[in-house]
Amino acid sequence: MYSKPFYEYAYDFARDKDQRSMDMETAKAMLQLLLGKHWPLYSQFSQFLEQSKYKVINKDQWCNILEFSRTIYNDLSIIDVDGACSTYHIIHTIGAVEPSQVDKPDKGASCND
């Protein structure tokens, strides 16, 4: 798998220079190139992106995808539901586990249902 500096460089290289975020179509293509062959859960994550309402990915999200791909086991056995809300939503959306197997974050958490 690629180093974090290379992955960050790929983001800066691929985005339009006059934009702070990368459009989703470019992001999906770049993620396929960078993670597609190295991350066993990539196809499920790609499906999540296809269903996403987002039109762009910012650099923080981009870096979090790499971190997610490196820290979550293929069987999703180390899920920190008290951590990032996006982890719950990604796991629930890709259908990797049944919703009853993962506790939903509190309503006080800063994410959208």
Image: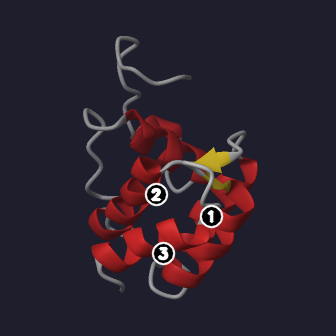
Q: Are marks 2 and 1 in contact (CB under 8 Å)?
A: yes
- Where's residue 91, x and y in %? 49, 49
Residue wearing tag 2: 62
The CA span between labels 2 and 3 is 10 Å
Report whether residue 87 is seen.
yes
Q: Which residue is drawn at the image coordinates 41% and 28% (left, top)?
A: 104
Occupied quadrant, residue 36:
bottom right
Q: Nearer the viewer, mark 2 or mark 3?
A: 3
Which is more toward the observer, 106 or 17? 17
Q: Label 2 sits on what residue type?
A: Trp
Element at badge 3? helix
Element at badge 1? helix
Residue wearing tag 3: 10
> Around disc 1, counting alpha carbons within 10 Å, would you say few (fewer than 14), some (14 to 19), or many (20 or more)?
many
- Where's residue 100, x and y in %? 46, 35
Report whether residue 41 is seen.
no
Would you place residue 78 above or below residue 89 in this image?
Answer: below
Q: Nearer the viewer, mark 1 or mark 3?
A: 3
Residue wearing tag 1: 27
The CA span between labels 2 and 1 is 8 Å
Q: Which residue is drawn at the image coordinates 26% and 43% (left, top)?
A: 80
